[in-house]
Amino acid sequence: MNTNKTTIDNNKNNSSVQAVDRALFLLKLIGESPSPIQVGELAKQAGLNRTTAWRLIGTLENQGFVEKDFSSKGYQLGYAVHQLLSHHDPYGSLIRRARRTLEELKEEIGETVLLSVPKHNGVLTIDQIDTDHSVRLVDYSNTISPLHCTSNGKILLSLLPDKELDILLEQPLKQFSQYTLTDPEDLRKELEKIRIQKVGLSIGELDENENAISAPIFNKQKNLVAFITLGGPSFRLSETAILQLHDRMLAAAKKIEEQLD
């Protein structure tokens, strides 16, 4: 019997079990925290050095079990946890409070209206109310859309600190249509317009047949919590028509904000 090999295998198993144990403990700490928690504080509470904590948090984040909060830079439970806990709807309250405004906007404009929330790698659509027209937007419900070519995603990018935006724009920007902005400098110019106008536009950038406009929704603490988006096929909802909805979208977002705690 090769006792040396057995010892090595046991050490590997022990190391793997220890990593799993530590990762689960960090997940538990994040779940128990009343607000997003910083990695430094997690390391302190778990009795780990920061490097180990960063590595474990990175693994949990890659699997969707935790995600970074853009406002506090701390970590909170991710969408994967909520998928596992299907009986628990983390966005139910937000959807209920926004639904009436979404329905009013859909009836008034006659196009599809969406409610989405920011994620570390895109925007997640949590509610979609479709138009009565037979030709409409595809169903984005429960899907994550990219940041650089969507009207809500570009709003999120426009609100990021410069250093965080620089890191994101160092990565290649995927081209989804012939109108997608793939040059970082062109996108920066677009984001500057959004900071001034307070709404985001996507003119055929994700799908060349779809146009959309979004407005941000903030809570009473002035933290970004969601986006309201109106979109439709480009032959019916032209860029000219979308630009005329600027004030209406901001008013709808404001109305939802008034319903939030």
Image: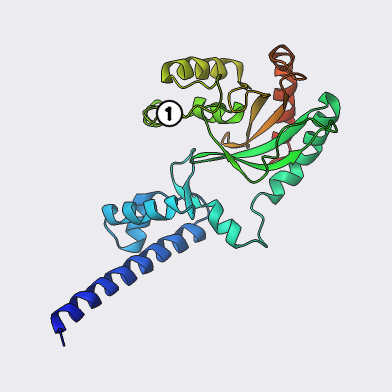
At a point 69% along the width and 45% down the height, the residue shown is 94
100 lies left or right of 89: right
At a point 33% along the width and 71% down the height, the residue shown is 17
Write down the residue under mark 1.
161
At a point 43% along the width and 41% down the height, the residue shown is 73
Please state which of residues 144 and 228 is positioned toward the viewer in this rendering. Answer: 144
Residue 195 x %, y %:
54, 19
Q: Quadrant of the N terminus?
A: bottom left
Question: Would you identify the image quadrant in which residue 103 lies?
Answer: top right
Question: Would you identify the image quadrant in which residue 224 lies?
Answer: top right
Q: Is residue 111 visible?
A: yes
68 lies left or right of 43: right
Q: Quadrant of the C terminus?
A: top right
- Which three-letter amino acid code belongs to the residue tagged 1? Pro
- Establish if 20 lies above or below 235: below
Farthest bottom residue? 1
Question: Would you identify the image quadrant in which residue 249 lies?
Answer: top right
Residue 181 x %, y %:
50, 20
- Establish if 148 lies above or below 46: above
Please state which of residues 195 and 200 is positioned toward the viewer in this rendering. Answer: 200
Please state which of residues 184 and 192 is positioned toward the viewer in this rendering. Answer: 184
Residue 64 x %, y %:
49, 52
28 lies left or right of 210: left
At a point 69% along the width and 37% down the height, the residue shown is 115
Please state which of residues 224 and 130 is positioned toward the viewer in this rendering. Answer: 130
The colour style of the image is rainbow
Q: Is residue 199 visible?
A: no
Q: Residues within 10 Å of mark 1 (few under 14, many from 20)?
A: few
